Amino acid sequence: MIQLSPQGAYSIIQPLIFFIIGIAIYSIIVYNLYRFVATRDIFEINLRQYNRSEHPVISKFLASILYLIEYLIFFPLFLMVWFVVFAVMFIAMSIQDFGTILLISMALVASVRIASYYKQNLARDIAKLVPFALLAVFLIEGATTFNWSQSTELIKQIPAMTDILIYYFAFVFILELILRAIYSISKALSKRDEIK
């Protein structure tokens, strides 16, 4: 026999509401953030607007300095944020040891950056694949996959992994500079060919 009551409805609908809100917020965050990380030209700060020099040599020099500032100051911050976002997702799932989580997170960031110089749509697909796959695992496995104590233990390992983090950040930063240089050179050469 069916027995409906406000208390029964509340106890049944409350978890549904939490899951709906959680999935919606998570999806919105992933949607807005993956498009940013997968963009080849991440920064649209355009510090060149502050270059007011009339002299061509000084203008080029200042433009180069401002361009370097964008990538020497802002890119490492960007890299750190995205690495932390991916690492937190993996830590929340507690699927691996901390060294493996660092490796996978940084490899994912680097792969997205490489793909963004090839095809930005590919980079977007990579950047959204893992977060949505983790969401699917969480939904299929249930909330039991999240282990606070194991996640806390993984976070406590961060100081012991500082040297690994430095190497990873340096490598991906240098990789980005190389990709940016290759892209800039190929862009300049294609413009030169168009002029001919």
Image: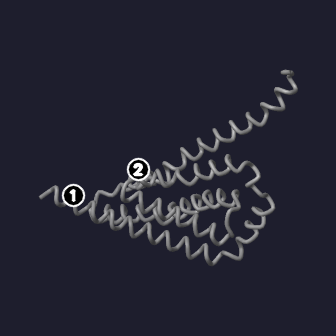
The quarter of the rendered structure image containing the N terminus is: top right
- Name which residue lies at 56% across and 76% down: 167
Q: Amino acid at mark 1?
A: Lys
Res. 187 image quadrant: bottom left
- Name which residue lies at 62% across and 48% down: 136
| Labelled disc at residue 121 | 2
In the rendered image, the vertical position of residue 42 relative to residue 154, given as above or below? above
Mark in the foreground, 2 or 1 = 2
Q: Amino acid at mark 2?
A: Asn
Q: How many numbered circles are shown? A: 2
- Residue farthest to the front, as pictured: 1
Q: Position of residue 36 (x, y in %)?
A: 49, 50
In the rendered image, the vertical position of residue 17 relative to residue 40, given as above or below? above
Whichever of labels 2 and 1 marks the residue nearer the N terminus, that label is 2
Q: Which residue is mark 1?
A: 191
- Residue farthest to the left, as pictured: 196
In the rendered image, the vertical position of residue 118 relative to residue 9, given as above or below? below
